Image: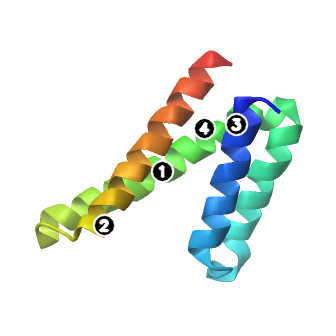
C-alpha cells in the first residue's frame, strides 16, 4: 500500500470518527469516496484534492472563529494545527502524482 492510499484511508477513518455518524450521512459518503479512491487509482488525485479543500475550509472556519472570539483553548488550536498539517500533506501528495 502506498502513502497516497494510506493518507486517504486514515483521513476517511478520522472523518468518520469525528463526525460520529452524524450529518445525515454526508460525511460517511465522503469517507467512502476517499476509501474507494485509495484502491481505484484514477480517483486518487481527485480524492486527495477534496481532502485539501475540506481541510482548508475547516481551517479557514476556525481562523475566522478565532478572529471573532479571541484566543481559544489549546485543544482548539491543536485541531487547527492538525487541519493545516493534513492540508499541506495533501498538497504535497497531489504534486507528487
Calculate the distance from the C-alpha at mark 4 to the C-alpha at mark 3. 5 Å
Q: Which residue is mark 4?
A: 49
Q: Could you tell me which quadrant the C terminus lies in? A: top right
**How many C-alpha atoms fall within 10 Å of the one at disc 4: few (<14), some, or many (≥20)?**
some
Calculate the distance from the C-alpha at mark 4 to the C-alpha at mark 2. 24 Å
Outermost residue toward the left in this view: 70
What element does badge 2 sit on?
helix
Q: Which residue is mark 3?
A: 46
What element does badge 3 sit on?
helix
Residues tagged 3 and 1 counted as in contact (Cβ below 8 A): no
What element does badge 4 sit on?
helix
Calculate the distance from the C-alpha at mark 2 to the C-alpha at mark 3. 28 Å
Residues tagged 4 and 3 counted as in contact (Cβ below 8 A): yes
Q: Residue at x 80, y 36 (%)?
A: 43
Q: Residue at x 72, y 40 (%)?
A: 6
Outermost residue toward the right in this view: 40
Q: Which residue is mark 2?
A: 76
Q: Which circle, 2 or 3, is nearer the viewer?
A: 2
**How many C-alpha atoms fall within 10 Å of the one at disc 3: few (<14), some, or many (≥20)?**
some
15 to the left or right of 54: right
Where in the figure is residue 12, as x and y percent of width and height? Answer: 69, 56
Of pointers 3 and 1, the one earlier in the residue sequence: 3
66 to the left or right of 37: left
Q: How is the image coloured?
A: rainbow
Of pointers 2 and 3, the one earlier in the residue sequence: 3
Of pointers 1 and 4, the one earlier in the residue sequence: 4
Foreground of the two, 12 or 75: 75
Q: Which residue is mark 1?
A: 55
Calculate the distance from the C-alpha at mark 1 to the C-alpha at mark 2. 14 Å
Calculate the distance from the C-alpha at mark 3 to the C-alpha at mark 1. 14 Å
Amino acid at each position: 500500500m502506498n502513502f497516497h492510499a494510506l493518507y486517504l484511508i486514515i483521513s476517511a477513518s478520522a472523518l468518520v470518527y469525528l463526525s460520529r455518524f452524524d450529518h445525515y450521512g454526508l460525511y460517511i459518503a465522503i469517507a467512502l469516496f476517499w476509501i474507494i479512491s485509495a484502491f481505484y487509482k484514477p480517483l486518487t488525485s481527485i480524492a486527495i484534492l477534496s481532502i485539501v479543500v475540506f481541510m482548508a475550509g475547516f481551517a479557514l472556519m476556525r481562523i475566522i472563529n478565532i478572529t471573532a472570539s479571541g484566543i481559544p483553548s489549546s485543544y482548539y488550536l491543536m485541531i487547527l494545527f492538525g487541519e493545516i498539517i493534513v492540508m499541506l500533506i495533501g498538497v504535497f501528495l497531489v504534486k507528487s502524482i
